[in-house]
Amino acid sequence: MFPFSKHRSRSVHGDDVLSSTQPIVAVTSIVETGGACTTLTVWRKSLLVSCEGFTVIDSNGDLIYRVDNYARTRPEQLILMDKDGNSVLLMHRTKKITLAGSWGIYEAKDTNGEAKVPKSPIWYMRKNLKMNILSTNSNILAYVYSAPFDKKNSYVIKGSYRCKSCKIMHVPSNRTVVEIKRKEARTKGVRFGSDVFDLVVSPDFDTGLAMALVLLLDQMFSK
């Protein structure tokens, strides 16, 4: 099991390691597919002391994904790695003015131990820059398009990332494929802070892409 816990009073705060002597158990959930989804526990903390990042475990407590960000300032690039440190997806901030608030998501290609940015992204994620209380799209956080901005294969992200209450919805079918929600402890009297949450992924959606979208939401709405 993943060593994810340390007891500290009756709540778990963002900088704490998760509490209680029992392992964290991810509860299988349903996300509008009628089938069992994959539920991952996401911890907004790197396993390396000198880094910021994320640690992702499965329902067995095994490490699945990790992110180690050595640049504690606003990064231009993020790398999602598997448990062995191999690059899975690479996210690069788009510098074009016409694509303000956008990131490209690329298939990571390792060259001599370093991830290189391919020429073309496989997905784009764009922050909703028109969020306000008067807008009909005020609950939309971001838009996700398969490159090059194909609206027929697109998603919207709705909710509140800061409250860890979000849904990623497939636009053509209006179906929820990923849900971000606060983690519920099975141990009575234990609460998890906002830095520990569940990522519930539908069977037909890639967990790596789902985690990449979480990383970009964090860049867009946690700073």
Image (cartoon, rainbow, N blue to C red):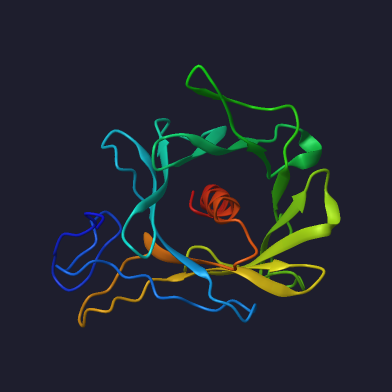
Res 5 visible: yes
Locate residue 70: give its quadrant: top left
State whether residue 148 is above or below residue 151: above
Locate residue 105: give its quadrant: top right
State whether residue 24 is above or below residue 52: below
**Left or right: 124 in relation to 4:** right
> Could you tell me residue 123's position as x and y percent?
72, 46
**Left or right: 30 in relation to 82:** right
Locate residue 1: give its quadrant: bottom left
State whether residue 133 is above or below residue 94: below
Q: Residue at x 24, y 61 (%)?
A: 18
Res 131 visible: no
Q: Is 99 in front, or is 180?
A: 180
Q: Is 9 in front, or is 154?
A: 154
> Could you tell me residue 173's position as x and y percent?
79, 73
Q: Residue at x 48, y 53 (%)?
A: 222
Q: Is 215 in front, or is 65?
A: 65
**Left or right: 70 in relation to 100:** left
Q: Is 199 in front, or is 39?
A: 39
- The residue at the far top in this view is 112
Q: How many marks?
A: 0
> Could you tell me residue 135's position as x and y percent?
76, 70
> Could you tell me residue 139's position as x and y percent?
66, 70
Q: Residue at x 22, y 79 (%)?
A: 187
